[in-house]
Image (cartoon, rainbow, N blue to C red):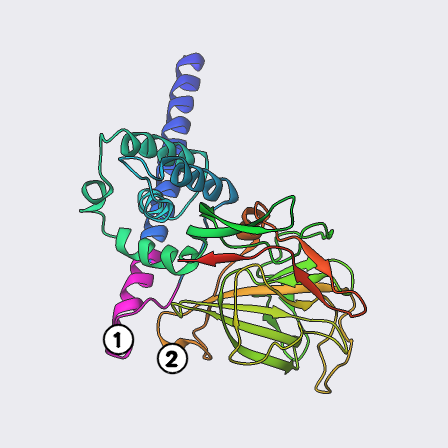
Amino acid sequence: MDREKRMRAWIRAEVMLLFIMMGAFLLRETGRTESMEQAVVTATSAAGKDYIKWVDFTVSYEALCQAYDWDVDTFDTEHHVEWIPLLAYTAARTGGEFDKKALKILNETSEKLAEGEAEIETLTKDMKYYPYYLEAYSAALGGLVGEYEAEVIGEDGQSTWQKKYGLKGYCPIARGFDYTHYDDFGAGRSYGYKRRHLGHDMMGLVGVPIIAVESGTVEALGWNQYGGWRIGIRSFDNKRYYYYAHLRQNYPYAEGLEEGSVVAAGDVIGYMGHTGYSTTENVNNIEVTHLHWGLELVFDEEQKESDNEIWIDVYPLTCFLAKHTQEVQKVEGTREWIRTTKIREF
């Protein structure tokens, strides 16, 4: 009799546990769906304008690498697997999560696309959130991969141009210069007022050459109370605003750089320092020497300098860009560094 009672008690406990687990799962999925609904609805309803107002860029380093490899490996084949639509499809399948399951989906889908067994348009035609992810990821990654020409210096010192396809965005730290970093996006900051850290810090030594991640136009250059000597570069499609801050005291920028200057990806634009946190110009008030770089996505000009700015976590992107560094050389008799080779974009 006691044994029968114990068995019934165990069964009731297991049923209760099952209901609790199902409830937690449904709550998580409902929350994820509501977050996506809010993001997309907000994107199409504010002041009657149709533009994205929120992006949570959660693409992992592993996903960036795998999608990129598929893109490059299938370029110039019958079935080119483009990395941004692939990432957007994966995100639409997983709700923006890039765990092991997502990586499996990404690779299995890539195999089908590469073999011609499926087309991305067919796979995504009924996916509610695919257009959102495609636009968001295109804004974040649109200028980093493509065709370009790289300068190659021969043994005779003469340069030739070699056509390439692949990563044309650069690591923001020049080749051969050490740095340390960790995922610090969203960490607390208190100078001036309490706020979240909306960029990524790369710690190094004063004077380390800073490299333009992507080609674009210098939109801001000068002193900022928080960022010290800083540079803001806008991509040519106006979707990305790159922010480089805390540059070197007394000699922060590459020679000749000014607002309106056009820079190429891989150009030296400035030098690492620890300026900022001061209303007075040219002051070193940052304790640790580092580059703060950030990436703002702009879907409408009203967002650019507003309470609705979209800054994304670039830590995974920084790790990814480490695949492509620019070699530099010192200009004798000066404090300047310049790149050793150039690229030309189509």
Asked if residue 56 can be seen in this view, the reply is: no
Amino acid carrying label 2: it is: Glu
* The C terminus, quarter of image: bottom left
Residue found 73% across the figure and 68% down from its top? 336
Q: Amino acid at mark 1?
A: Lys
What residue did someone put label 2 on?
302
Q: Main secondary structure of the magenta part?
A: helix
Residue nearest the observer in this picture, 17 or 31: 31
**Callout 1 touching callout 2 (CB < 8 Å):** yes
Foreground residue, 320 or 19?
320
Q: Which quarter of the figure has residue 221?
A: bottom right
Q: x and y percent of residue 50 in the render?
A: 26, 71
Numbered label attached to residue 110: none
- In the image, is 211 to the left or to the right of 311? right
Q: How many marks?
A: 2
Q: Residue furthest right?
A: 333
As rendered, which of 160 and 314 lies closer to the eye? 160
- Left or right: 289, with 50 as reference point: right
Q: Would you name the residue on which mark 1 appears?
A: 49
